[in-house]
Amino acid sequence: MFHSARCPALIVVDMQNDFVRRGAPMEVPSSRDIVVRLQALISAFRARSLPVVFTRYVAAPDYRHLQTRLPWLELIEPPVSACLPGHMRGYADVDQDRDAAAMIDELAPEPRDIVIDKIFYSAFFKTNLHQQLQSLGVDALAVTGTLTEMCVEDTARHAVHHGYPTAMVRDAVASNSPTRHDAALDAFAGNYGWVMDASEIEARLMAPLTKETDG
């Protein structure tokens, strides 16, 4: 994939305080295990002046479009107000309140990065992500972040529908369910694109551009 891509981009999905920080209302504890790996990937893309995209799930009235049976929807209502931009919250692993919807400090976007706010699972749905990627000449995507079987998988599948050769990065995605995590990666590899390790992505970024023959 990346051997033939001239401008691959990295997508970091929803690595926000209300998902990652200890004690967060939508906490995904395993998301903290992928932070160092994400830092390395982000650095590798930035060092080559390749696009880095951060997505934020933000609470919005349109969430009612989803089935109200989903228990997590109650968390975005007051008084919890999960993932509400501007809502300040304390977490057990930091000493000061943080914006609930903001990216964690360890993965803070830089001015040249793209930040996409989304109100559903996919970063392509009701956003201008596709247009921004097109304007930059992006021709492949590596998708990382949380949760594997929800926003990461949905974003990766929609990327394929938009024509991007896409990889989910196996050791840079996180879930609260190992079973669902593995099933999502298996389904994506079997039907949509690639499942690769972070080290493979980094190696392909450093390799000379060649014509890919084996997918």
Image (cartoon, rainbow, N blue to C red):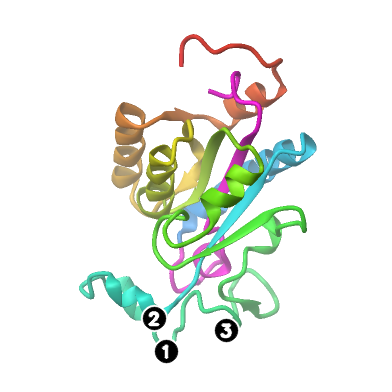
Q: Is residue 9 magenta?
A: yes
**Residue 23 in the figure: left or right of residue 208:** left
Mark 3 and mark 2: Cα distance apart in space = 16 Å
The magenta stretch spans which residues?
Answer: 1-27
User: Are the two marked residues, 3 and 2, in contact with CB atoms closer than 8 angstroms?
Assistant: no
Disc number at residue 78? Answer: 1
The disc, 3 or 2, on the residue closer to the chain's N-terminal end is 2
Residue type at tag 2: Pro
Q: Secondary structure at mark 1?
A: loop
Q: Residue at x 58, y 11 (%)?
A: 211
Residue to which mark 3 is pinned: 87
Disc number at residue 61? Answer: 2
Crowdedness near tag 2: few (<14), some (14–19) or many (≥20) residues, C-alpha within 10 Å: few
Q: Is residue 52 magenta?
A: no
Main SS class of the magenta portion in the image = loop
The disc, 1 or 2, on the residue closer to the chain's N-terminal end is 2
Q: Nearer the viewer, mark 3 or mark 2?
A: 2
Q: Nearer the viewer, residue 169 or 140?
A: 140
The disc, 1 or 3, on the residue closer to the chain's N-terminal end is 1
